[in-house]
Image (spheres, grey):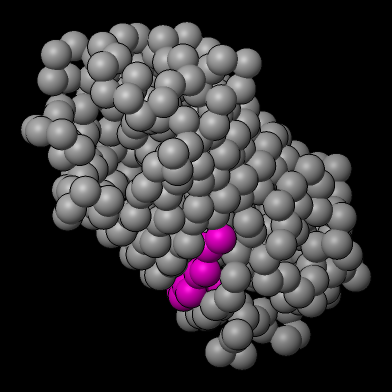
Amino acid sequence: MSDGSDFKMPRRHPITNELSGKMAGRRTFHGKFPGVKILGSLLVVLISVLGCHNSAQEMEPRAYSRAPVGTQFVLLTYGYQTGDVLTDASLPLKDVKVKLHSSVLGYGRTFSLAGRQASLALAMPYVKGNVTGVVFEQAQQVTRSGLGDVRLRFAINLKGSPAMSAKEFAAYKPRTTVGASVTVVAPTGQYDPVRLVNISSHRWAFKPEVGLSKPIRRWTLETAGGAWFFTENSNFFGGVRRGQQPLLSIQGDVIYTLRRRMWLSFNGTYYRGGQTIVNGKINADRQANSRIGATYSLPLNQRQSLKVAWAKGLTTRFGGSLNTILVGWQYTWVKR
């Protein structure tokens, strides 16, 4: 769904032809800006905001927490993000701001794999976003809403968390856990190659990760490191081929357990890399950003819980510096 504006360029300016794929790679704007460079920067700004790869910005504490075999959950979340998007100062883009509303429906369950606790989770997002900015001294905005790309995550605890029944789990003393996971994002969301801005990024993305969790009485210290790898979108706006280099990320969490199933965490993440590649040319848009946040989990009854999370950009070299508020409801049960 669009409001029809879609970051339109002035009709008589030569960059219009470049954005339509007719003159990509030639110098325009009085010889100062290569068309590929401007298009690449627009892609980073708009796709990183609406195309759901703020993936590295996500902070999820207790990603490798223990649970009995047969535990299942249904999750429903609502998130609101707002803030600025930092771009290359040499380009005719400025005052780029974003407002994003998103909801996610998820399902997951734990099972035994080679005697270890493993889990599989599936998430389906819906996104509605608005981006405003000044392009060539002209105020523009674009609005999109629709289904985002489906996400699948497989995780296994390699050390410190064997597969256990509910009875065994209740008697088990927590210890240091080492886990690994793979997250896959499939290009199933709303996409139209005629539009520069889309909900889906129309490519596959993969993130292998390794995490460690160490309990110390009521405290738990966690760290995890991984990298996003992306396939190429060969059907981008104007016939452009768009790729992206790997995006490395590291996360740390400090968690305090107030009582059973009630906890508070302080989170931080840093991510680096992710330069975009347009028609084989690498753009100077390397990210080197950090975020901080906090999460609170409140049990409502034996099976239901409520989670509230907050996060904000701490340092941003390129891309979105967004403030995030998230509220989630989870229903959990154990199949015996």
Q: Position of residue 202 (x, y in %)?
A: 74, 59
* Viewer-nearest residue: 290 or 100: 100
Q: Residue furthest bottom?
A: 4
Image quadrant in which you'd find residue 317: top left
Range of residues picked out in magenta? 124-135
**331 to 7, vertically: above or below:** above
Q: Principal SS element in the magenta part?
A: strand
Residue at image position (71%, 52%) is: 186
- Residue 87 in sight here: no
Q: Is-magenta flag for residue 73?
A: no
Q: Nearer the viewer, residue 153 or 322?
A: 153
Q: Is residue 287 above or below residue 254?
A: below
Image quadrant occupied by the N terminus: bottom right
Q: Nearer the viewer, residue 99 or 159?
A: 159
Quarter the C terminus occupies: top left
Q: How many marks?
A: 0
In the image: residue 282, left or right of residue 157: right
Residue 70: x and y in percent read: 47, 37
From the viewer's perspective, tell me whether residue 292 is left or right of residue 46. left
- Whether 128 is among the magenta residues is yes
Residue 282: percent from left, percent from top: 75, 39
Image vertical order of residue 159 relative to residue 317, above or below: above
Q: Give the residue displayed 55% in from the left and 77% down from the top.
A: 145
Is any atom of residue 152 visible in this view?
A: yes
x 26%, y 54%: residue: 304
Residue 71, by quadrant, is: top left
Would you place residue 240 above or below residue 219 in this image?
below
Going 42% across and 49% down the picture, which residue do you hit?
A: 73
Taking depth in this image into account, of 213 and 170 the one nearest to the observer is 170
97 sits left or right of 152 in the view: left
